[in-house]
Amino acid sequence: MQLRRSYFFIAGALLLLGGVITASGMSGGMRGMMQDGMQEILPPGLPPELLPEAQSTGAKLLQRYCTQCHLLPGPGRHTTEEWPAVLARMLKRMDHMSGGMMSMMMGRIDTPSIAEQRTLRDYLQRHAQKAIDPAQFPALDNTAAGQAFAATCSRCHALPDPRQHTAIEWIGVEGRMQRNMNIMGRSIPDEATLQQILMFLQERARTEE
């Protein structure tokens, strides 16, 4: 009984550290428990080939270091202003998890060098979510489509500027967001509302270059 309580105490501590634990050094059973416990909090990981500039140093650093503890995040998960604080928090966690009992359970956790941290921060900020400026889009507040977009998408991240993608690209982005909401256990709007949101974005999307 004492062993069982200790096991769940350790698992709870890891959950408080945040992230879906996927480090290769961690046992399969512990990894599965972490994933089950966090799957409704964190969105699913992004396939590496969908990263912006997927072959760049920044993208490779993101894959190397961030997937030690959780699934691969896309740079669009946060805004340019948000990323420095998020990255600092993750670096602190990596330092904490690289020694002692955490290291024994999870295997080796590497922390990027100062130069790598700068490259990673620049990459994340360069491809970050560009938040919408409500002043440039009055329809955000005074149309049903704009209100549906704001109410739905702000539950998980900053509202994106429609000009980040073309009309065609928004179809794929909306489909991916629906999948994420489903995996995270979030309620998905009905089909009519989804169409409203898509039309709002497509009508204000970046024109084809």
Image: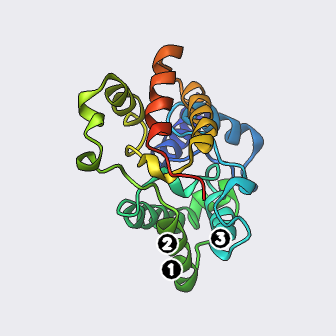
Given residues 116 and 203, the one toward you in this image is 203
Kind of element beneath mark 2: helix
Kind of element beneath mark 1: helix
**Which labelled disc corresponds to residue 121?**
2
Q: Position of residue 157 (x, y in %)?
A: 41, 43
Residue at image coords 53%, 23%: 185
Spatial separation of the CA atoms under disc 1 and disc 3? 11 Å
Q: Do the residues under discs 1 and 3 have CB atoms within 8 angstroms?
A: no
Three-letter amino acid code at the position of disc 3: Leu
Spatial separation of the CA atoms under disc 2 and disc 1? 5 Å
Residue 53's place in the image compared with 145, above or below, is below
Q: Position of residue 159 (x, y in %)?
A: 38, 43
Residue hosting label 3: 61
Three-letter amino acid code at the position of disc 1: Arg
Kind of element beneath mark 3: helix
The quadrant in which the C terminus is found is bottom right
Residue 34's place in the image compared with 192, above or below, is below
Which mark sits nearer the N-terminus, 3 or 2? 3
Q: Do the residues under discs 2 and 1 have CB atoms within 8 angstroms?
A: yes
Which mark sits nearer the N-terminus, 1 or 3? 3
